[in-house]
Image (cartoon, rainbow, N blue to C red):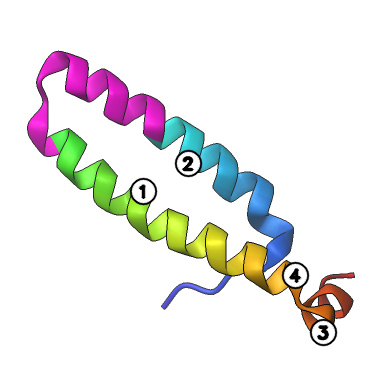
């Protein structure tokens, strides 16, 4: 179980950028397994980021975040 809040969006976005760089480098080196594992993590992270961004759009979520 993983729980996070919108205040951690900057860290999640930074992690996403790092993972994109890892995937790109692994693709260039032909490291298919590294690409596969990190793409799965990227997918999960995208869901987290999208969910948190959606929460920010709701008035009750904005009140909770402040």
Question: Helix or strand or loop: what does disc 3 sit on?
Answer: helix
Marks 4/1: CA–CA distance: 23 Å
Marks 1/3: CA–CA distance: 28 Å
Marks 2/4: CA–CA distance: 21 Å
Q: Which mark is residue 60?
A: 3
Please state the horizontal and vertical placement of residue 11, each as a whole percent of the image. Answer: 62, 46
Q: Characterize the local packing of mark 2: few (<14), some (14-19) or many (20 or more) Cα atoms within 10 angstroms.
A: some
Q: Is residue 35 above or below residue 53?
A: above
Pointers 1 and 2 in contact (C-beta within 8 Å): yes
Please tell me in which quadrant of the rendered image residue 59 appears. Answer: bottom right
Q: Earlier in the sequence, mark 2 or mark 4?
A: 2
Residue at the spot of label 2: 16
Please state the horizontal and vertical placement of residue 14, each as a whole percent of the image. Answer: 57, 38
**Residue at 30% across, 23% down:** 24
Q: Which mark is residue 57?
A: 4
Image quadrant where one finds the C terminus: bottom right
Residue at the spot of label 1: 42
Image quadrant where one finds the N terminus: bottom left
Q: Earlier in the sequence, mark 4 or mark 1?
A: 1
Q: Earlier in the sequence, mark 1 or mark 3?
A: 1
Question: Helix or strand or loop: what does disc 4 sit on?
Answer: helix
Q: Specify start and end residues of the magenta stretch as a single range.
A: 20-33
Q: Which mark is residue 29?
A: none
């Amino acid at each position: 179980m993983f729980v996070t809040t919108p205040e951690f969006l900057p860290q999640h976005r930074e992690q996403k950028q790092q993972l994109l760089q890892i995937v790109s480098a692994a693709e260039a080196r032909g490291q298919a397994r590294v690409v596969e594992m990190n793409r799965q993590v990227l997918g999960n992270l995208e869901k987290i980021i999208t969910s948190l961004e959606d929460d920010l759009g709701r008035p009750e979520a904005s009140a909770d975040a402040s």
